[in-house]
Image: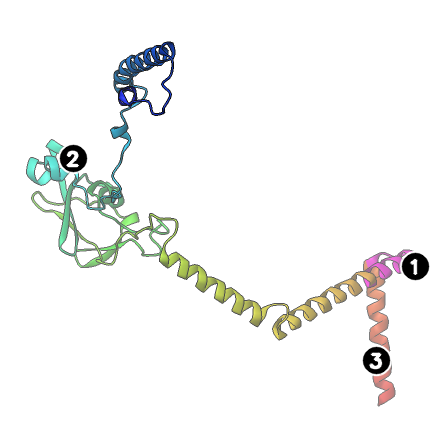
């Protein structure tokens, strides 16, 4: 740009003086040489990348949600390399079958079945972990057993401990986003249910007023009992009796009064 500006002719009917032309030409030459030196330095400076490096594509990159291959699928698992080659110890082969998928591992006698399932990568749903609820039940030899309270038994050589897992026992999917369309509708539904419940059972509804009146009545009855208890305590103190003796005497007097009333009615 400076070079192009230096070559443009000056417009106007009056030409500037010669010493001004010389100064202006020297200034342009100095600016052009400075720009020629600074521009390469800026292009190779590590602190300021080239302008083209800062440009990014306008198309957003989508995250890859495809299933990643496991280490066993890349390098080979126990079925390809052998149990000892992949670090599995034990003398009893264990197979977890769920639908059309089968996971194999090795276990020792007395090893908890839950630990063996975790070692094989088999998902088992637990709840109480005491063998009471039956959430972790799996089928072995036609019988349902509790995974959390069962150990691997001894088997003859060559036999595998086969465990059949229910197809419905799958790990629940968690949403990776804080907001989704489903969460919006769920929140809207909860708000509607809350408003309906407030109208039906809130303080302005008939049921709400009844509950409020019952609570007020109960509080008043409690206050009356407290006052009567306090008055009885003061009367017992004035009569020189304990509270229990005073209450016993009051009950006896009340019983005599009721008997006299019944006799008078007869």
Q: Please give the range of residues in magenta.
A: 228-243
**Residue identifier under label 1:** 239
Tell which tag, 1 or 3, sits nearer the viewer.
1
Q: Give the CA separation, mark 1 to mark 2.
A: 88 Å
Q: Nearer the viewer, residue 45 or 172?
A: 45
| Residue 6 place in picture, x, y as percent | 29, 19
Of badges 2 and 3, the one in the foreground is 2
The reply to whether residue 265 is visible in this rendering is: yes
Which residue position is annotated with label 2? 88
- Mark sitting earlier along the chain (2/3): 2
- 230 falls in the magenta region: yes
Q: Secondary structure at mark 2?
A: loop
Tell me the residue that label 3 is attached to: 259
* Secondary structure found at label 3: helix
Q: Earlier in the sequence, mark 1 or mark 2?
A: 2
Q: Residue at point 86% right, 71% down?
A: 253
Q: Residues within 10 Å of mark 3 (few under 14, many from 20)?
A: few
Q: Nearer the viewer, mark 1 or mark 2?
A: 2
Q: Is residue 258 above or below residue 142?
A: below
| Relative side of 57 to 174, left or right | left
Name the quarter where the C terminus is drawn. Answer: bottom right
Query: Does the segment drawn in magenta span residue 114?
Result: no
Q: Name the residue at 56% across, 67% down.
A: 198
Q: SS for tag 1? A: helix
**Residue 13 at what x, y percent from top left?**
36, 24
Crowding at dot 1, Cα within 10 Å, few <14 / some 14-19 / many 20+, comes out as few
Residue 91 seen in render: no
The picture quadrant where one finds residue 242 is bottom right
Residue 179, image x and y in percent?
Answer: 39, 52
């Amino acid at each position: 740009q400076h070079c192009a500006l230096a070559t443009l002719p000056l417009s106007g009917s009056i030409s500037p003086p010669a010493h001004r032309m010389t100064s202006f030409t020297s200034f342009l030459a100095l600016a052009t040489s400075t720009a020629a030196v600074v521009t390469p330095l800026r292009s190779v400076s590590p602190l300021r990348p080239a302008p083209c490096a800062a440009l990014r594509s306008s198309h957003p990159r989508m995250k890859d949600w495809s299933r990643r291959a496991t280490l066993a699928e890349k390098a080979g698992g126990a079925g390809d390399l052998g149990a000892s080659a992949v670090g599995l110890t034990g003398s009893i082969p264990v197979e977890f079958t769920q639908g059309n998928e089968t996971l194999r591992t090795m276990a020792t006698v007395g090893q908890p079945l839950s630990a063996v399932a975790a070692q094989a990568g088999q998902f088992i749903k637990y709840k109480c972990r005491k063998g009471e609820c039956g959430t972790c039940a799996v089928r072995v030899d036609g019988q349902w057993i509790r995974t959390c309270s069962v150990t691997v038994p001894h088997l003859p050589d060559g036999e595998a401990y086969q465990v059949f897992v229910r197809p419905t026992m799958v790990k629940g999917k968690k949403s990776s986003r804080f907001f989704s369309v489903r969460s919006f509708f769920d929140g809207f539904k909860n708000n509607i249910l809350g408003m309906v419940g407030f109208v039906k059972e809130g303080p302005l509804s008939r049921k709400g007023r009844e509950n409020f009146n019952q609570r007020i009545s109960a509080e008043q009855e409690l206050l009356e009992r407290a006052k009567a208890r306090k008055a009885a305590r003061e009367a017992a103190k004035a009569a020189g009796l304990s509270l229990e003796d005073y209450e016993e005497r009051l009950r006896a007097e009340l019983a005599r009064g009721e008997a006299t009333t019944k006799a008078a009615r007869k």
